[in-house]
Image (spheres, grey):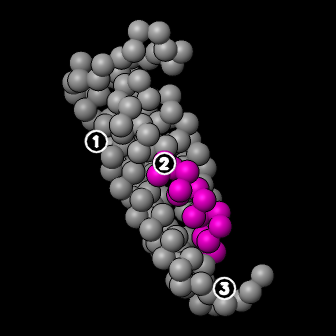
Amino acid sequence: MSDELSTGAVGLTAFAALMMFLLGGWWIMAGLVAIVNSDFFVITQEYIFKFDATTWGWTHLILGFVVLFAGIGLFSGAVWARTVGVILAGISGLVAFAWLPYYPVWAILFVTLSVFTAWALTAHGRDITAVSDPDMV
């Protein structure tokens, strides 16, 4: 492993942090919509993950705040934020997959961003930490 920092990797990790920030905000919006107006989402009749839209709303709202704060932590280069980010990206992707019949376009976008975020944080997360804390190199 090289001690040189990859500016491209730092950019990818910063982009992943931004995506986590945005993804958290989108989860919060989707959660609030489901809590306030549960009739907004049309539900498929025969789906294995059939929950009340309000239940999904609270799930999205809580997950959204956690993902949002982890994304903010990534900008500071916090190692805990990388770990939490990878775990939450996985959880976010699974929740988005289960949410697919409620709002397919958003669900596919959430799954895609979750997979990209997990990849960027595992492959290149160390570089942004080194940039924010030069003593770690």
What type is the residue that disc 3 sits on?
Answer: Met
Q: Position of residue 20 (x, y in %)?
A: 44, 57
Earlier in the chain: of badge 3 and badge 2, it is: 2
Q: Position of residue 93 (x, y in %)?
A: 53, 41
Taking the spot 50% from the left edge, 28% from the top edge, the residue there is: 98
Q: Is residue 116 magenta?
A: yes
Earlier in the chain: of badge 1 and badge 2, it is: 1
Q: Nearer the observer, disc 1 or disc 2?
A: 2
Q: Please name the residue that numbered disc 1 is placed on.
A: 29
Q: Please name the residue that numbered disc 3 is placed on.
A: 136
Earlier in the chain: of badge 1 and badge 3, it is: 1
Q: Nearer the observer, disc 3 or disc 2?
A: 2
What type is the residue that disc 2 sits on?
Answer: Thr
- In this view, 24 is above or below 83: above
Which quadrant would residue 135 be assigned to in this image? Answer: bottom right
Outermost residue on the top side: it is 45
Horizontal relation, residue 15 to residue 116: left or right: left
